[in-house]
Amino acid sequence: MMKLVLIGLGLLIASSTAQIRTKGGTLIAKEGESLTLRCEVEDPSIAIIWRKNNDVVAVDDEILDTYGGYEIAMEGSTSVFTIKRVEPINSANYSCALAEPEVSVTFVIKVQVKPLVLISPDTGVYHARVGEKNLVITCHVKEGNPKPGVVWTKQAAKLPEDIKKDHEGARLVFPEVKKHHAGKYNCLTENVAGMDRATIEIHVAEPLQGEREEKPWVKNEDTFIPVRKNQNASFWCTYDGTPVPQVEWLFNGYKINFNDEKFKKTSETAQRLNGYSKSTLTVGDITEEAFGDYACRISNKLGSVIAVVHVSGRPGPPQLSLDDSELSWTVRAFDKILEYQLCHRLENADHFLPENCNSVRVKKSDNNGDDKWTHTIDLQSYLEQGQKYHVQLKARNALGWGSMAKDAINVELRRPEKEETKSTTIISCISSVLVALLVALL
C-alpha cells in the first residue's frame, strides 16, 4: 500500500518494495558557487532519474543535459548530483525519482543573484539647461534575486526636495531643472547576495543672456517601428526650442498614464546632445494593447508641435515601387511574414473589393534575418493590359494583418505593339515590291 508523506517543502513517496531515504527541502545557493544534491535509496539496482522541473537531466550515472553544467556519481546507495556552477537559470525544482515503482523526492533550489543596476540615459554625464522641463533619470535593476529595491542619493549633498520620485523610487523626475540640481547622483541597490551602484553626473548650464526665443521643433527618424510582443520597445524624438520646451508622450491621442496596466513598465528618459535634446520612451514587455500611435509633443510659450510614430508587432505599411510592370515592396516586421495581399481597382473606382485582392506567397529570399521583407512580382499576371489601376498591398504575420501602403500606386499596362509593327512592316515591303514592278513595266 502506497503512503504519501510531506516533509518540509520536499515530497517523499515511499512504498513497501522501494524507498528513497533522503528528505527533500528548500536549498539556498549563491550564483557562481557549486551545489550538490544527494539522494540515498534502499535498492541502488533500480534506475535513478534526476529531473529539473519536468525535464529529465540524468539517469543513473549518465548526464542527458550536457549543457546544464552537471556532474553525477554513485557513492554506494547514494546518487550524488552536482551543479558545478550555479546560475540564475538553476532556480527550479530538482527531483530524484526511482523508475519503478514511481517514488520521488523534490529539492526546491533558490539562487541568490547579486544585483546589477544601470542608469538611463547611459551617458555618464548629462548636460542640462536651467529651465529644462521634466528631466527624467531612471535606475534599472537588470539582475538580482531576491529582487532588490533602489535608493537614490546625491554625493556630498542631500537629495533636493523639489525632485520627485516615482516607479517605486526608481525614477527621479526634475519638474524644472535649476542650478542646484547639478552634481553626481548615485543609484544604490542591495540584497543578500551583494550590492551594486551606478552614478550619473548632471551638468547644468545657465541660459544665454539675450538668447532669442524660438518656436519648438520636433522630429523622429521613422513613422513606423516594428517591435516584438512581450519584449522591450524603445522609440524617441529629437527637439529643441527657446525657452526650454516641455516634453509629453501621448498614446492614441491621450497623455500616457504610467499607472495604466499596459504602461506600468514604461520609462521616459531625456538627454541633452549638441544643440538639441532627445526624449526616449521605453515600453517594457510591450503587449498588443500597447500597439498604436505614440506622439511626442513639444511645447513652450511660443507654440506646440508633435511627431507621431506607429508602433506594432504586426507588419508595417509597405513601401511600393514600380518599374515598368514589376512591382517591388519592402515591409518591416520582426515576426515572420506569412502572406502578402495585393489589391487593385480601376482608376475611377472608390473601393478595393475582396474579389479584386490576390494572395501572394512569401519566399525564403524575402528576408535575411532582420526586420525587412522585400518581394517583387510582375503585375501582368494580375492586371489587364490597357487599363488604368490603383494598386495597394498589405502583409500578415502571426499577430494579424498590418496596414496598407501609405499611398496607392498608379499602374497602366500598355498593350504590346509587336504584332502591329510586324503587320506594318509586311505591308510596307509589299508596297515597295509593287512599286518596283510598275517602274520596270513602264
Image: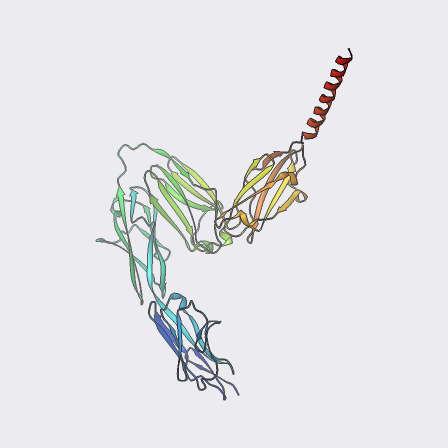
Is 400 in front, or is 171?
400
Q: Is residue 168 above or below residue 247?
A: below
User: Could you tell me which residue is drawn at 26 percent across and 39 percent down?
Assistant: 206
Is residue 279 something that shows in the picture?
A: yes
> In the drawing, does residue 348 fall left or right of residue 158?
right
Give residue 240's quadrant in the image.
Answer: top left
Residue 239: x and y in percent read 38, 39
Count how many numbered circles sit on residues in the image: 0
Residue 200: x and y in percent read 28, 51
> In the drawing, does residue 212 fall left or right of residue 380?
left
Residue 260: x and y in percent read 45, 54
Q: Is residue 266 above or below residue 303?
A: below
Is 327 in front, or is 274?
327
Q: Residue furthest right?
A: 441
> In the drawing, does residue 198 fall left or right of residue 359?
left
User: Could you tell me which residue is drawn at 59 percent across and 42 percent down?
Assistant: 393
Is residue 350 something that shows in the picture?
A: no
Residue 160: x and y in percent read 27, 51
Q: Residue furthest front?
A: 440
Dividing the image into 4 quarters, which one contains the C terminus?
top right
> In the drawing, does residue 312 fall left or right of residue 392?
left
